[in-house]
Amino acid sequence: MAESLESLSALGTCLSEQEVLIQQGVRRFVRERYLPRAAQLFEAEQFPRDLIAELAALGLLGASIQGHGCAGMSPVEYGLILQELEYGDSGLRSFVSVQGSLAMFAIAAFGDEAQKERFLPRMARGECIGCFGLTEPDSGSDPGSMKTRARRDGSDYVLSGTKMWITNAPFADVAVVWAKLDDSAESVTGFLVERGMKGFETPKIHGKMSLRASETGEIVLDECRVPAENLLARKRGLGAPLRCLNEARFGIAWGALGAAKACFDSALSYTGERIQFGKPLSSKQLVQAELVHMASEIVKGDLLALHYGRLKEKNGKLLPEQVSLCKRNNVAVALDCARRSRALHGANGILLEYPAIRHQLNLESVYTYEGTHEIHTLVLGKALTKQNAF
Ligand code: TGC
Ligand code: FAD
């Protein structure tokens, strides 16, 4: 079980007492409050909104932000909580990532004091839910090609365009929307679009076979009038949303391993009990080779995340290519572990009764969002060779 991986990596010996306390608290919450419902929520395509207040009470919303009612956790503490959440489901972790690392971080980094005071404390309490609209139907990996436009009109801005695949959008109270003021990527600017503003709709996307326990929607802006005081004025250009993505990608690098650990635990327990050819499957060399492969990759991924987490604590930030390396590696490891775990469960592996297929399907999205695996390969290729292969 999780304990066998932990004794192998001895990761706990590298954590402070406070870090372990935070980890154990979230672990308890996930095991008691989320896991008993995980399969049913996935099947019903439902995010458990009733848990938002509990997530907030644990200090998990905007956890790494300092002040304004946020917990001010360190990068490693933040990574540990996301890992525990994703042990439950990538959808649960996604909710927390988007609320904290994307929506709240954008306001904390690029908003003025009035905007921070207006939104962050309520968002930390889970009374105001945020989403982050960068992707569009024709603009995914290449956000610089976005078509959403904002034009100044008196004391307002008028926004038009469509954002696609937006986590939390169907029930968000505020959307951080990225729009261009002219045709250049340098003019990309963030706007706080609030529920109730005329011309703002967020239809839900149905029929996803992945991240079913997370609500995903469009953001449709039809001449939506937003007051100038809702503009995130402190930074302009594509670098602004990309800075938010660095935060979220770092968290995902930790989180994905939580899903991998759930898959490993299930495979270890299942193969220990399942008898074929007169013996438990886990007594077979080929089965052990699979378990060992998974365990090795998970432990290496943990060490990578911890190393970059400590570096982030020391320097206050990471290079974008370091974040890319960590997200790319750990998500690929997690998806590979989920597939191996599913196979080790045989036919039972396709049932929701076991976590492997749910995590496998979820991780297909995690592999694609926040920069696809290939985009992170290109970021790293560019950093190494100084040649742009986008
Ligand atoms: P490029 O010309 O390279 O850069 C434009 C400007 O941005 C700066 N920059 C960064 N700044 C901070 N952090 C980073 N990681 C940065 N990467 C680039 C760069 O220095 C430049 O600044 P300046 O001042 O010189 O103008 O941009 P490009 O147009 O060639 O695009 C390359 C790249 C890497 C940005 C793009 O390919 C990329 O990252 N694509 C992936 C898009 C993406 O990740 N979208 C995610 C949407 S949000 C989401 O998926 C949420 S899922 C949430 C959940 O449920 O958990
Ligand atoms: P495309 O960019 O069209 O890519 C298609 C394929 O081509 C991929 O394999 C890609 O790697 C490859 N490719 C692209 N460019 C190159 C290249 N230059 N060289 C080689 N290969 C290339 N976005 C948000 O803004 N906010 C959210 O909250 C959000 N939540 C999401 C939730 C879910 C469940 C999902 C699935 C996505 C979410 N996204 C969100 C969108 C996500 O960020 C995009 O899907 C992602 O950036 C990829 O864009 P795309 O789907 O348009 O794929």
Image (spheres, rainbow, N blue to C red):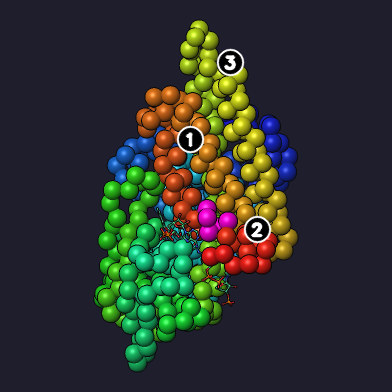
Residue 145 left/right relative to 24: left
Looking at the image, residue 124 lies above or below residue 339: below
Furthest-bottom residue in view? 154
In terms of secondary structure, where does tag 1 sit? helix
Magenta stretch: dominant secondary structure: helix
Which residue in the protein does label 2 denote? 322
Is residue 30 part of the magenta span, yes or no?
Answer: no
Q: Earlier in the sequence, mark 2 or mark 1?
A: 2
Q: Residues within 10 Å of mark 2 (few under 14, many from 20)?
A: some
| Quadrant occupied by the N terminus | top right
Query: Which range is magenta?
Result: 373-377
Question: Which quadrant of the structure image shows residue 333?
Answer: top right
Residue lying at the far top of the rendered structure = 278
Residue drawn at the location 35% of the way across and 56% of the way down:
216
Relative depth, front residue between 14 and 138: 138
Helix, strand or loop status at disc 3: helix
| Inter-mark Cα distance, 3 to 1 | 20 Å
Residue that numbered label 3 is attached to: 283
Q: Amino acid at mark 1?
A: Arg
Q: Is residue 277 left or right of residue 4?
A: left
Tag 3 and tag 2, C-beta contact below 8 Å: no
Residue type marked 3: Ser
Tell me which residue sits at (56%, 68%) in the image.
243
Q: Position of residue 308 (x, y in %)?
A: 68, 54
Front residue of 343/390: it is 390
Question: In the image, what residue occupies the spot 29% across and 55% down?
Answer: 205
Left or right of 35? Residue 223 is left
Q: Earlier in the sequence, mark 3 or mark 1?
A: 3
Disc 1 marks which residue? 339
